Image (tube, coloured by chain):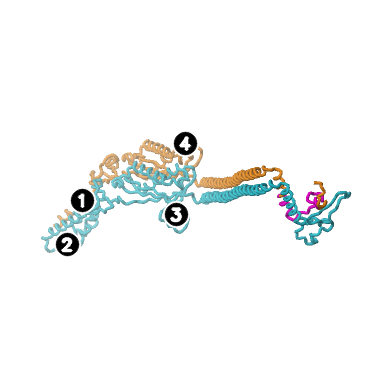
Chain colours: A orange, B cyan
Amino acid sequence: MNGRVLFLAIAAIAVLVTAWQTFFIVDQRQQAIIVTLGKPVRVINPPGRSEAGLHMKVPFTQNVIKLDRRNISLNAQQEEIIGAKQERLVVDAFVRYRITDPLLFYRTLGDERLAEDRIERLVSSSLRQVLGTATQEDIISGRRAELMRLAKVDVAKRAVDSRMGITIIDLRMRRVDLPATNRESVFNRMRTSRQQVAAQLRAVGEQQKREKIAEADKEVTVTLANAREQAGTTIGQGDALRTRIFAQSFGKDPSFAVFFRSLQAYDASLGDGNTTLVLSPDSAFFKYFEHGPSGGGRK
Amino acid sequence: MPWNDNANPGPWGQPPGGDGDGPQRRPQGGGRGPRRPGQDFDRLISRLREMLGGPGGGVQPGVIAAALGAAFGLWALSGIYLVQPNEQAVITTFGAYTGFAGPGVNYHLPAPIQRAEKVKVTYLNRTDVGGDAAAAAAAASTGANSTGGDAAESLMLTGDEQIIDLDFSVTWRINDPAKFLFAVRDPDEAVKAVAESAMREVVGKTPLQPIISTGRGLVQQQTAELMQKTLDSWGAGISVVEVQIRSAGPPSEVVAAFREVNNAQQDADSAVNEANTYFNRVVNEAKGDAARITQDSEAYRSRAELEAKGEAARFNQLYAEYRRAPAVTRDRLYVETMQRVLQSSNKVVIDAKGATAPIILPPDVFRPRNAPAAAAPAPQPAPAQPAAKAQP
């Protein structure tokens, strides 16, 4: 009885251990390398093949090494790049890569940390090479996408050449900035440019103001002059009418008209009481005053 | 594999309770199985012996079978799971992707064989770049003029080589759960990196002024498109719903200069307003003045005409009578007029005939008669010379 139980227990344990050593699961996210006593012999579920699931190996002598199968991110270290015109730019880039040849990857790099180190160096030299020929303006705006593509192609080629078993999926510049020391000069430029705009706005405002005032003054002068012109015409019409009316009526007897008009004028101009007249008794008015009732006959 | 666990529920003395967490332990069971019995081997053997060697040994196999059956049933039931309405489940069989399950109660083969990973497909994820949106909102509500963010993330170069302080958020959701789970490592970090890269690329092509004013929508749209393109090229299974610029403005170092431009615009506007005010005032006043001039001239014309008519009429009337007796009328008119004139005037009558020397008249004579002469004597008598008053 005791012996049987013991045997059963040992057998069960042996079966379990063997099963544990034989079966293994390769996740959808992973790829695996089967290593026989340190020598890689087989790859399971590499990119391009769909082999995730339950797998078997020779127990005890074979090991499974699992690697990531996904698109892996790698943030490159910040680089200070010198552009074509000696401008300095700080570039932050990131790379997405995938382990596409797990055997090669395992042989040359072994693990991701080493891979990151190597890739970072590749990225750094690619960025320097590609961006070194471009001007700051190109890097920041004009040809950014194109330069990123060139750098990506360059890194991808270097990665293939260095036989690391990885494929570069993408390289993107995350940030392209000026070094802190250059930033202040940009701020200065921004400030002065704004000041220029402000001055320009004020000047244009002042210009419009003066134009408007000048226009107003002109308008005033022209309005008044027009009015005066019209008034002159109107006054002339009045004078003309008056002249015509007088001419019509006085024309009937010009000499009497002059006499009559003169009398009116004497009345109007001398009759205000402020006039001192120094008269000679010879005047017609004093005809009788001087010569008596006969009037002197000197008419 | 589970034989080991199920073989000895007895030693722990509570078979049903021990089975309750049996299925959960099963995934690790295979891993721990070989070691644990080895460590506790002697104790295990002694307990097994105690139990199996106890009274009523004939019923023991039945107990073991029942316990095994119950454990197996529970294990099988552990495959029941619930998918919420906003979720989708991705089923993997031994790690390999084998299908989806929609919302509701679902079943998968129990744990080591199949697993279900639930993914929130309708949930809108939000990634903030340039500081946390909530922190920024808090800072804004306390009145601080802060973007609440990381300057390195917020400051970026624009197309006209200026620096802008820009914070934004990306809203995204999972549109392909399988790709989302299996294609890209750390998708959240990937979204952020792509967002930053895309935004900086777009901002790098756009001058500063449009970004902080009217061009914001375009920048958001272009960034979203660029992000989507990049994520699609990776097969990330992520759909960018919206890119929203939370705040975009000049960096704090140059804010004053930008405000100054606004002030200048205000000043310019007010200068123009002043000028318009002046214009309206003086031009309208001038129109009023012009109307006065015109009206005056028309008044003059009317007066000239009417007065002339009046005088002409008077003359005509008089003339009609005059023609009947011209001489008499002439003399009468003359004398009457002279009478009126001399009546109201100072008069000096001098007979200068035969005078050899100039006649000097005293100044009083010339003083106006009805002037308020304070020191003057009565004007009526002409003091120096014999004067004759015309009497009517």
Q: Tell me the CA gap for discs 2 and 1.
A: 37 Å
In terms of depth relative to the viewer, which is nearer, A271 or A291?
A: A291
Q: Which residue is mark 2?
A: B50
> What mark, if any, has residue B148 been given in the picture?
3
- Residue A137 image point, x, y percent: 48, 40
Mark 2 residue crowding within 10 angstroms, few (<14) / some (14–19) / many (20+): few
> What mark, if any, has residue A265 been given in the picture?
none
Residue under mark 1: which chain is it in?
A: B
Q: Earlier in the sequence, mark 2 or mark 1?
A: 2
Residue under mark 4: which chain is it in?
A: A
Q: Which residue is mark 1?
A: B109
Q: Tell me the CA gap for discs 3 and 1.
A: 49 Å
* Highlighted range, magenta: A264-288
Q: Secondary structure at mark 4?
A: loop
Q: Which residue is mark 4?
A: A133
**Dots 4 and 1 on the same chain:** no
Q: Secondary structure at mark 1?
A: loop
Q: Secondary structure at mark 3?
A: loop
Amino acid at the residue labelled 3: Gly
